[in-house]
Amino acid sequence: MSNWIELNSGLDIEKIKEASFGRPVLIFKHSTTCPVSSTAKDRLERNWSELSGIEDAYYLDLLAYRPISNAIAEEFGVTHQSPQVLIIKDGVCIYNESHFGIRSSAIAAAL
């Protein structure tokens, strides 16, 4: 299971970009009241061993921090979805997927 890093400040977006120059960084945008989102999060956590290239995994509670989600969408040029996973590498989003398309095997292939 991942050790999620809580994403709760817009300043964290710049930290994520900077860290991504050394290694890929995962962002998981989660709606805490959505069963699809809970299923996606559970599937990621159960299959975390497939994501050996990910050292930093950020968790964003969309209900508490929707403005940060909007800033992520704008910064990385993706459409806001919920749930959604993004892989940031070298300062750009190299992969994003949402809903039941979130699969650790597909993320691993993108790495």
Image (tube, rainbow, N blue to C red):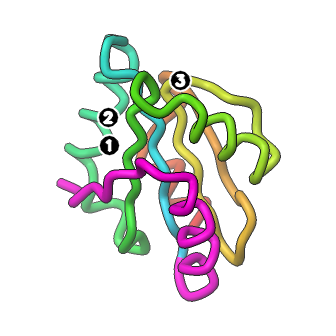
Front-most of 1 and 64?
64
Q: Which mark is residue 44?
A: 1
Q: Are marks 1 and 2 in contact (CB under 8 Å)?
A: yes
Which of the two discs, 2 and 3, sits closer to the camera?
A: 3
Determine whether 29 is above or below 88 in the image: above
Q: Which residue is mark 3?
A: 82
Determine whether 40 is above or below 110 in the image: above
Mark 3 or mark 2, which is nearer the start of the sequence? 2
Within the magenta stretch, is there residue 55?
Answer: no
Q: Quadrant of residue 30?
A: top left
Secondary structure state at the residue bearing disc 2: helix
Q: Are marks 2 and 3 in contact (CB under 8 Å)?
A: no
Counting other residues with Cα less than 10 Å from the Cα at mark 1, is it few (<14), some (14-19), or many (20 or more)?
many
Which amino acid is tagged 2?
A: Lys
Q: Position of residue 32 (x, y in %)?
A: 31, 21
Q: Which residue is mark 2?
A: 41
Task: Identify the image quadrant of the C terminus.
Answer: bottom right
Disc tally is 3
- Residue found 41% across the figure and 51% down from its top: 7
Which amino acid is tagged 1?
A: Leu
User: Alpha carbon of mark 2 to alpha carbon of mark 3: how far?
Assistant: 11 Å
- Residue found 33% across the figure and 52% down from its top: 6
Indicate left or right for 102 with 87 as reference: left
Q: Position of residue 102 (x, y in %)?
A: 49, 35
- Specify the segment rendered in magenta: 1-23
